[in-house]
Amino acid sequence: MRLEVGCMIEMQCAQPTPLLLLLRPRSGARQWIARESYSLTPQVPATEHVDMFGNLCQRLVAPVGSFRIESRSEVIVSPWEDAGHGEAYVPVEALPDDVLAYLIPSRFCESDRLGSLANEITYGQAPGYDQVAAISRWVHSRLRYLAESDPMPISASEALGRGEGVCRDFAHLGIALCRSMSIPARMVAGYLQDLEPMDLHAWFEAFVGDRWYTFDPTHPDQNKARVTLALGRDAADAPVFNQFGPPVTPSEMRVFVREMAG
């Protein structure tokens, strides 16, 4: 399947503002970037590097006044079906080295506090994929979905206490519960086909068997294509943008996902 995806962010800056952006998808096993464009208005110098999670990060300083960022990509994606029922739990000592970072508690995923709850949720499930699937179903049923909320991320424990949240909060809780059972889990930010209302989306992946599998506690039955923009331990590692200095809130943001012919 070929998708056209894109994001436009416009902001008003009261002073020159350093930005770190994660708006370019990267080719990988499940997606191939066939064509892309990236524009800044007004045009300013920008550089790019790859961070410790493999994300493409753009660095620049936004000027005073109105500033717009537009990113568009044509992406060939693999089918969304990513079930791995019965895939086994991998003992910690057998995990690949690059997976180990996704086992430990992180800023928004306090896995060291949720072990007893995770054991209750997964009681009777085969260790591995089936445990993660049970966690994802439980998060979906436990939290009430909010299309809009406070733009500041909250932790897994805070989301659990509130009983509601946006997609990243659902992902944080799923990640924390998985890690509490020594199952590596990581945050994913990107595009989801036919999401309503359309916006950037967050879900999580868990490592079972011999690879990462996709889980989406916000939209568990959403058999639609996905495009990954960023990966990380939690939302702190995978934001759309980080800005430094006085807070800057986007004055406008538009996101689109369209299926293309061919």
Image (spheres, grey):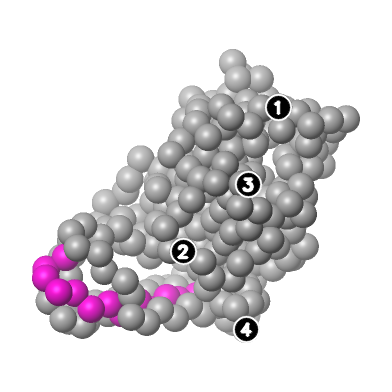
Label 3 sits on a secondary structure element that is helix
Q: Where's the C terminus, which quadrant?
A: bottom right
Image quarter of residue 30 = bottom right
Counting residues from the start of the chain, the first of labels 1 and 4 encountered is 1
Kind of residue at badge 4: Ala
Mark 1–mark 4 CB contact (< 8 Å): no
Counting residues from the start of the chain, the first of labels 3 and 4 encountered is 3
* Mark 2 vs mark 3, CA separation in Å: 16 Å
Counting residues from the start of the chain, the first of labels 4 and 2 encountered is 2
Residue position for label 3: 160
Label 4 sits on a secondary structure element that is loop
Residue position for label 1: 116
Residues shaded magenta: 5-17
Q: Is residue 11 magenta?
A: yes
227 left or right, relative to 131: left
Residue position for label 4: 261
User: What residue is at 32 percent from the left and 48 percent from the top?
Assistant: 50
User: What residue is at 35 percent from the left and 55 percent from the top?
Assistant: 56
Residue position for label 2: 150
